[in-house]
Image: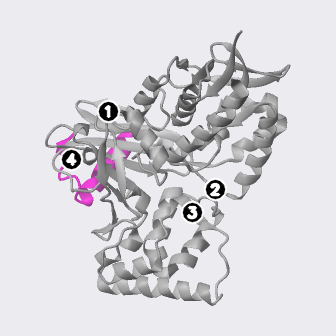
Amino acid sequence: MKFYKLCIIGGGLAGLSLAYYLVSLGVKDIVIIEKSEVPGGLLITKHIRGYTFDVGGSHIIFSKDKEILNEMLYILNGNYVKHRRNSKILLDGLFIKYPFENGLKDLPPQKRFECLRDVIQAYIDRLLGKVKEPHNFLEWMYYVFGKCITDTYLRPYNEKLWKTDLRTISLEWVGGRVPNPPLEDIMKSAVGLETEGYKHQLIFYYPLRGGIYALINSLISSIKGLNLRCGEEAVRVLHDNNYNIIETSKDVIGCMYVVSTSPLNESAEMFRPILGKMSSNLRLLRAVPLVVVSLGFKGDAPPYHWVYVPTEDIIFHRFAFLSNYSPYNAPKGAVSLITEITFRDPDEATNVSNYSIVNRVIEDLEYIGILKNSRYVEVYDVTRWRNAYVIYDELRSKVLSEVRDTLNKYNIIVHGRFGLWEYLNMDVVFRKSKELASYLALKLK
């Protein structure tokens, strides 16, 4: 049995960035076990007949943390392009500036007035204590934005995205993920003045060549002595004589510490020897599955980066023009586009056929005027993900606190979006990897 100081389960962004920081601190003797043949997790890019598709959804590089942003760009070694965000919300045939609250000027006058009236009324009601503090995501939207903005955009979009009752979603995640501009900015927008929201994302970066997977490739190239074992699944984690033992689909590995970035909701059997009956609770953790349909077609794209679609009768909740992210993502005179579609459960996402979902996407793109004619489509791809968006419900915190406390006693640490079961952007994953690496370096040197 081969013995390592540290075994990382999962070769996605969390696992690779952790290894990157550990190696930079002088820690050696690390192995990464990755179930898939290709590492990267959601940051997977496919290249099909000259088109580049990020098939894990639209990913961009941005951060309010300048240190982390600079480190991510440093890893790309100059292979990136800088953008000023141009994103929209498609509503009743109009392309409204994103975030919606900063795009009220794009609405018809009556709707503008109603949105402004209701957001001011909501503000006054909060000041006078006329409304109770919100306890769930749906209540929070009405509490902060009032009826018009919530009913026009926020509620329908989030119901479409989350595919669950918004009253069951807690507020733990809202602060860093949902734009919440000052009232003054909303008022300015309503009277036609330009304002910007979600400002730390206003300027973003993207790989010039290679799609978002260029970040993964660059990470791998930057880790000296990387021991990355792909196509090998961690099946069981056991603890014996102060050491951890990992039984994989190909081997048995011993290690002092284990860091798991594997999806917790799929880790019940892997951790059963450690957690016992408690491991079954991991199956209670919920995430929204995602299907990404990518299309390459002849034509021109509008100057937008990505577009949100709250309308119920359009199948996708968001689409992105990747050929606007980088000119190398599509042949000249063509468009590289991805659409994102969520489902209620993995079975529903699996059972829909490629033929039906691609044809529905094409029909909807024609209907909204993005695709002029289905004959212009040259390539397509369908990629399915069992876990995409982590759901913060009432069970989550209880399950996580019990599981983490028990695993930590055995030097087993969970990490990353699906290990921590947190809705993390890439920059926060890097930050958490850096912090965890500093902690582990003291233990492993």
* Disc on the earlier residue, 4 or 3: 3
Question: Which secondary structure lies at badge 1?
Answer: loop
10 Å neighbourhood of mark 2: few (<14), some, or many (≥20)? many
Q: Nearer the viewer, mark 2 or mark 3?
A: 3
The disc at residue 392 is 2
Q: Is residue 219 above or below residue 201?
A: above
The disc at residue 395 is none
In the displayed structure, does residue 217 sit left or right of residue 419? left
Identify the amino acid type marked 1. Gly
Question: Which secondary structure lies at badge 3?
Answer: helix
Q: CA distance from mark 2 to mark 4?
A: 39 Å
Q: Nearer the viewer, mark 1 or mark 2?
A: 1
- Per the image, the residue denoted by label 1 is 210
Q: Looking at the rendering, in which quadrant would you find the C terminus?
A: top right
Residue interval drawn in magenta: 353-378
In the image, what residue occupies the spot 25% across and 44% down? Answer: 323
Q: Nearer the viewer, residue 124 or 276?
A: 124
Q: CA distance from mark 4 to mark 1?
A: 27 Å
Identify the amino acid type marked 4. Ser
* Disc on the earlier residue, 2 or 3: 3
Q: CA distance from mark 3 to mark 1?
A: 32 Å
Identify the amino acid type marked 2. Tyr
Dominant secondary structure, magenta: helix
